[in-house]
Amino acid sequence: MRIHSDYMTVQTTQKREFMDITPNVKDAAQKSGIRDGFVLVASLHSNSGVFVNDGEAGLLQDVDEWLNRVAPPRDDYHHASRSESNASAHLQNLLLHHQVLVSLTDAKLELGPWQQVIYAELDGQRPKRILIKVFGE
Amino acid sequence: MRIHSDYMTVQTTQKREFMDITPNVKDAAQKSGIRDGFVLVASLHSNSGVFVNDGEAGLLQDVDEWLNRVAPPRDDYHHASRSESNASAHLQNLLLHHQVLVSLTDAKLELGPWQQVIYAELDGQRPKRILIKVFGE
Amino acid sequence: MRIHSDYMTVQTTQKREFMDITPNVKDAAQKSGIRDGFVLVASLHSNSGVFVNDGEAGLLQDVDEWLNRVAPPRDDYHHASRSESNASAHLQNLLLHHQVLVSLTDAKLELGPWQQVIYAELDGQRPKRILIKVFGE
């Protein structure tokens, strides 16, 4: 079993921003030299998520607005914030999740034609770290 | 480390349909010959999910109705649809997620007594592919 | 590839309770002797979840209340209950998910500074089992 870890740091210009990081995941997979296995893509923060879905711009705007409907910013959360984050960013992170596991076959990511790996920044404008860890043969 | 990939194609008769695919996952695990490891079960589409929960028929109806409450079909989504899918199917897919990782021990799926692997078709009546990938020893 | 499985049984004093089980996950990782790999942490029940987020007490209270807003207890669910669980506990479990995969590097869990592994009991006061399965080298 071979294992290869990559880290990427992103700092978005917007407070909230959705980025297609599929190319970064592909790069890490290629660098690993692993042809058959899996890639874990995980945010190392509780207010930014990673998910697999269609990365079409209109849909990502829908996701953004939907998150704010299902887990809206409120003034009455109990969260004793350790930074300026509102609890809503954490709840939205639970909705999206912070990680995905993508299959790698014949040295290619095994995603459907309309599936991309999306990084969801919910409290940006500061450096955030993402783990991309490949394992297999 | 051994790896075995299976693919299943489903075409539901209903537009929305929930299927217990635990037997398919068991079959793939058995074919792999792997006794200790894990099985990734992933939808290769952005409008159909895979989750682990109780597969009781009434509960699956509750899940179906709940998804339509939390992420309802609307006419004002921004998604520039690449097919006839409404954005709501994508948002519901985010809620359920497109994949699970199930443990395999002594050649048996390690699920609780009321846990099944459920495929959630949110935009069916056409062929959809599911990846079942086993790894371990 | 080495694999090590641990099981923990919890019985909460409250019907609903959130527990930081990061120490248990660390213990299992240490016992495994595996230095580079992954840990799957999975609830073996459909009414208790496992997630990674900030374990701050106020936030966990926010999560608890939010779950009851997004998937409230109702009298008109279709779920033919196999126990006293209301369907809402299952829907809330779907929101949180029942499992996470945590990276292990240099024999340490690879979590961000505000990330903990949280067990979410949604129907407690009885014994529940959690699988902690480590694999790697």
Image (cartoon, coloured by chain):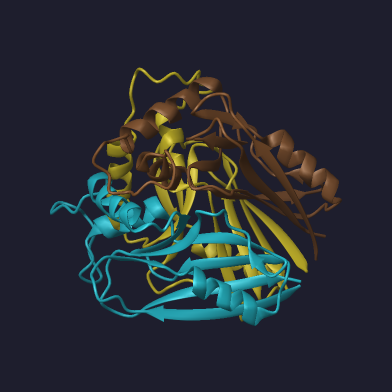
Chain colours: A brown, B yellow, C cyan
Picture coordinates of residue B46 (x, y %)? Answer: 53, 37
Task: Work out whether B131 lies above or below B26.
Answer: above
Q: Quadrant of the N terminus of chain A?
A: bottom right
Write the residue at 46% across / 41% down: B94
- Closer to the camera, C75 or A66? A66
Task: Work out whether B2 lies above or below B67.
Answer: below
Task: Work out whether A136 lies above or below A8.
Answer: below
Picture coordinates of residue B84 (x, y %)? Answer: 47, 23
Q: Could one spot residue A81 in this view of the protein? A: yes
Q: Is residue C46 left or right of residue B123?
A: left
User: In the picture, residue A55 is in which quadrant?
Assistant: top right
- Closer to the camera, C62 or C87? C62
Write the residue at 62% across / 32% down: A11
- Closer to the camera, A10 or B12? A10
Q: Quadrant of the C terminus of chain A?
A: bottom right
Q: Is residue A37 left or right of residue A68?
A: right
Picture coordinates of residue C130 (x, y %)? Answer: 45, 74
Picture coordinates of residue C115 (x, y %)? Answer: 51, 55
